[in-house]
Image (cartoon, rainbow, N blue to C red):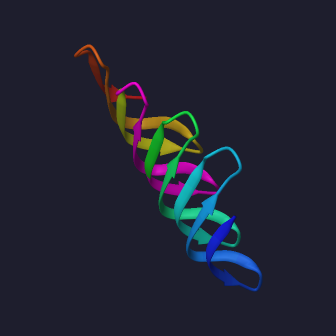
Amino acid sequence: MYRGELVEGKRSGMGVMVYRKARIYEGQWQSDSRNGRGMERYSNGNKYEGEFMSNKPHGKGLYTWANGEVYEGEWRAGLKEGQGIWKGIFGDSYIGEW
């Protein structure tokens, strides 16, 4: 279910998409794709907040796993790529290139 702005029948501007399996995206759309800033909460409890391009994390963002692990840094086409910081749940961490 989608609630938000439409342009010529396509999701554009700000909107919220609720998927069947308790997944939610709230943020910017362009030409029916998640583009711009947004937040996506997955059915497994994980969450991503940051920039999207072509429906995938792209740019700077923060990913939080349900178990408490965190990655903050750069993304490219849905994958961690570039500079970033990962923090584990046992005090371990990694700062550097992905």
Q: Vertical placement of 47 versus 85: above or below?
A: below
Query: What secondary structure prevails in the magenta region?
Result: strand
Q: Vertical placement of 42 versus 38: above or below?
A: above
Relative image position of residue 44 (x, y in whole percent): 55, 33
Q: Quadrant of the N terminus?
A: bottom right
Left or right side of 17 for 69: left
Q: Residue furthest bottom?
A: 8
Q: Which residue sits at x=57%, y=64%?
A: 35
Q: Which residue sits at x=67%, y=63%?
A: 33
Q: Vertical placement of 41 versus 14: above or below?
A: above
Magenta segment boundaries in residue numbering = 50-68
Left or right side of 55 for 26: left
| Residue 58 within the segment the image draws in magenta | yes
Q: Residue furthest left?
A: 91
Q: Along the line of sight, which residue is nearer the eye, 97 or 64?
A: 64
Relative image position of residue 8 (x, y in whole percent): 76, 86
Q: Along the line of sight, which residue is nearer the eye, 83 or 86?
A: 86
Image quarter of residue 54: bottom right
Q: Which residue sits at x=41%, y=43%?
A: 74
